Amino acid sequence: MSDPTNVPSRRARPDFERIALLLQGGGALGAYQGGVYQALAEADLHPDWVAGISIGAINSAIIAGNPPERRVERLRQFWETVSQPPMGIPYMASLEIKNDMTRQMINQWRAMGALLWGAPDFFKPRVPPPIFLPVSSPGALSFYDVSPLDSLLQRLVDFDLLNSGSTRISVGATHIKSGNFVYFDSLKHKIAPAHIIASGSLPPGFPATEIDGEHYWDGGVVSNTPLQWVFDERPRRDTLAFQIDLWSARGELPRDMVEVDVRLKDIRYSSRTRMGTDQFRRNQKMRRAVAKLLDDLPEALRQTPEAELLAQEADDKVYNIIHLIYHAKNYEGSSKDYEFSRRTMEEHWKTGYSDMIRTLRYPEVLQRPRSIDGVFTFDLAEQPLE
């Protein structure tokens, strides 16, 4: 691995057939993905395909549903809207809080506010809660009402543009009756606000979303990352993929009950994307070996059913998988995914921007891999500090 060097903010498009942006779910942590996208946009690295789960689906819709020059503005508008300070209290950006205990208290207070009052133009509590009264439909079986999100998406996303094919979008959800993971993809579906909301319908906080008579929950119930969906796509293409995760599978042994809850969430929602990447790399090595062997086979053998079956899996494409993971501060605690304060949102956004800027300083990130398996993986957390 070479040392990082400074690179210009604008560059020629990398030599790949496709640039994919893969966005994990994680609630309030999703502002990190906004910062990442800002850095990508400034480097003129606009994705051909965005795929997301839950909050990643919302960020994906804003990206795919706006022209490149407006995407960062619209992402900022979304995150500033849902993180508006309560009761008109101004956000004091100049006030620096260095004490972790103080930050933890403030974060917990704001998280409690989200539990009690919701997030502006995103979700609001049901009064009275459904636990005390019978409900009339699955769409009301939740502690919060997400109808404000529908209106916000309508304001921030041009769904005609989103469905035009200029940028492909895929969002994952869980079909409740079958328990199966499904994707709504703009190549096969006309994407509407309901598809985006379905991807983030995490129970029991948010209700099931009905689409064409079927009901769906958050895709993170089954898998919180769209990595496999993108890499299983046929026909395969040379791909530069940016996998942006909001939960870290790696961590320390918990020391108290709060840390137990934090660690459980991290493991559950990380979806072990590093493991998925390693497995893809092994499979790709086998596919390339099969492709080489088939090229060397006599014509008669290549016509056999067995060879034709192997040819369906053979692949000589190349893949760069650039993996960024948000690493939460100790004071964020187990409420980090529903703590929607403006201060924390700005911290998440700034961290995502900084992490992607650092990543793009490694020139091999945007170069075609030359390894035998045709796969290059990059994880900023495993690189030496600059």
Image (cartoon, grey):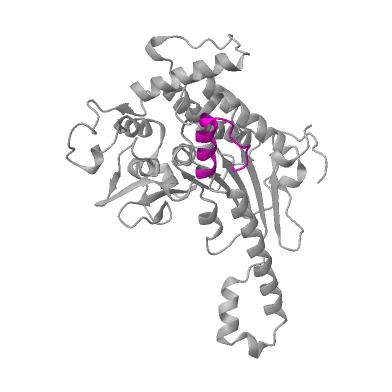
Above or below, 58 against 104 in this view is below
For image coordinates 44% across by 45% down, the residue present is 220
In the picture, measured across the screen, residue 97 lies left or right of residue 182, that is right
Q: Nearer the viewer, residue 43 or 2?
A: 2
Where is residue 85 drawn, in percent x and y? 43, 15
Q: Is residue 263 magenta?
A: yes
In the picture, measured across the screen, residue 206 lies left or right of residue 22, that is left
Residue 178 visible somewhere in the drawing: yes
Residue 118 visible somewhere in the drawing: no
For image coordinates 51% across by 16% down, the residue present is 105
For image coordinates 32% across by 33% down, the residue present is 146
In the picture, measured across the screen, residue 246 lies left or right of residue 80, that is right
Q: Which residues are magenta?
A: 249-268
Where is residue 142 drawn, in percent x and y? 29, 36
Q: Is residue 362 magenta?
A: no
Image quarter in which the C terminus is found: top right
Where is residue 31 drawn, in percent x and y? 52, 30
